[in-house]
Image (spheres, rainbow, N blue to C red):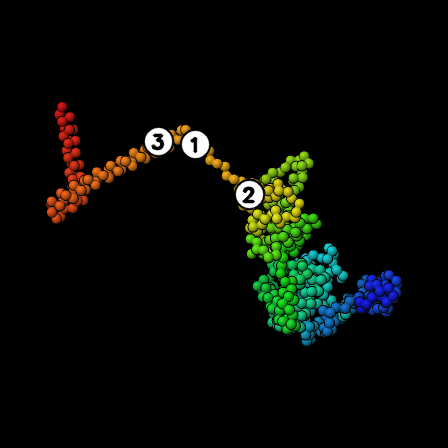
Amino acid sequence: MDSEPCVTCKGDDFIEFKAEGDLVCRNCGTVKESRLIDERSEWRTFSDKDKDTTDPNRVGGPTNNLVEGLTTTIGRERNDGGLSYTLNRIHARTNNPDRPLQAAFKEVARMTELLKVNQVGGERGEGGGKACVYVARGGVGHVGVARMTELLKVNQVVKDRACEIYKEVVEAKSLKGRSIKALAASCLFWACRQEKQPRTFKEIVAVLGNDVSKKEIGKCFKDLQQLKKDELHKQGASADALASTMNQTVQEPREFALQYGNKLGLEFKLRKVAEDIARASKPPERRMPWDGRTPTSIASAVVFITMTMAEIKKDAEEARAGGTSGGARAIKALADAALTRVALVSQVAEATIRAAYKDLFPYIPDLLPKGWATQEEIARMPNPDGRIVAAAWPQQQQAAAAPAAPPAAPSAATQQAHQAAAAVAAIAQQAQQVAAAQHAQQMAAAQQVAARMGAGVTPHNLTAALTAFAAAAVQRAAAAAQGGANGQ
């Protein structure tokens, strides 16, 4: 089918009648094309008489470019005496160049099923969300990708994209020798990012268990990025195209915020608020204090802020309706419960979430959607230091901006005390001056006596001797006075 308009009315709105194979214009009814071939799987409402199954599938699934050019694999059937199982086992022992690709497809399918990536519209796509499990014709098992998607539970788009990336890598023959599980996991990690359903290395490693390490997946992912860059350079892509392709692999906090909100069962309005806060936390061309933190920690703090503010608004509404406000302690308890729930869902430590919340705390009025919360409600947000009292930073800012009050005048008693202290200090200073003058006179007299007595006598020695002589004389006089008193 082409994109040419209708030959009669020049309209471009057509409807396809699959039963007749006609493409008809909605405006005038002109048949633009006929005998169209429907490439979807053909269905019937009855089963084979010689089989006990009720599967109405007649000629297999739709065309799948992922399995184009693969070799034939013998499928397995029931009630045939085990013949198909025997043939399948014998055929598997033969040389099959597509076996690694099939194993990778099954691994991706298993991982996506375990990761539980959100389904489109909350439902699985065609085939019950088990894409890449079977080949369109012949029942060939997509061994690796299918297994991973079943474990991670991603939707049809993510599964197909992961399979496409893996097939491109295999055809490029640039990453030979890599582990199938590690390479399939890195392809799925990239596909989740491109389809705005990001998953972390930690989640993927948890799905795989001890089969592959986080370091190995990260190394394969870096190799994939370099391979994509090399391909774009060979194709002569512009710098903008290269940057656009690489930016598809950058994780954003809003994507994780939506994911965490869905897992926590938040209503649509709160999920939208969390998305708006996360988007506002990454302003273009502006550095923020939390830029060095991971998207998962920022998203966790954003969801925590959203849940806590929702509880504060609910408490305020109950108070306005005539109820009793819970107070700061009640809000603190609700915030702690919300923090625990967010930490369990996001797999981020509570201490990390608190640290990110501390960075976001001063900017909450700017991050929240306009009109969603009042200043009084924002002031009740828990203090990031963990104290019971609610934060009141707007009042603190107002107090800091207000001019300082003039100091009070001292009382009469205070003035008298200050004057007495000043007089005592003056008397002490005069006494020090008198003592210094007397000491200078003594030193001058000692110098004169020492000069007369000749060498070997210094003023300091003479002064010390005079001081000792005077002290001894005082002691003798005191002893004589004491003896006279005793005789009387």
Above/below status of 297 relative to 316: below
Q: Identity of the amino acid at label 1?
A: Pro
The first of marks 1 and 3 along the sequence is: 1
Front residue of 394/334: it is 394
Q: Is residue 14 visible?
A: no
Say which residue label 1 marks.
410
Sort mark 1 into few (<14), some (14-19) or many (20+) by Cα contacts within 10 Å: few
Dot label at residue 420 = 3
| Circle 3 SS class | helix
* Residue 357 location (% of width, % of height): 58, 49
Q: Identity of the amino acid at label 3?
A: Ala
Q: Is residue 376 visible?
A: yes
Q: Identity of the amino acid at label 2?
A: Gln
Q: Is residue 34 left or right of residue 321?
A: right
Residue placed at 62% from the left, 41% from the top? Answer: 376
Sort mark 2 into few (<14), some (14-19) or many (20+) by Cα contacts within 10 Å: few
* Residue 162 location (% of width, % of height): 68, 65
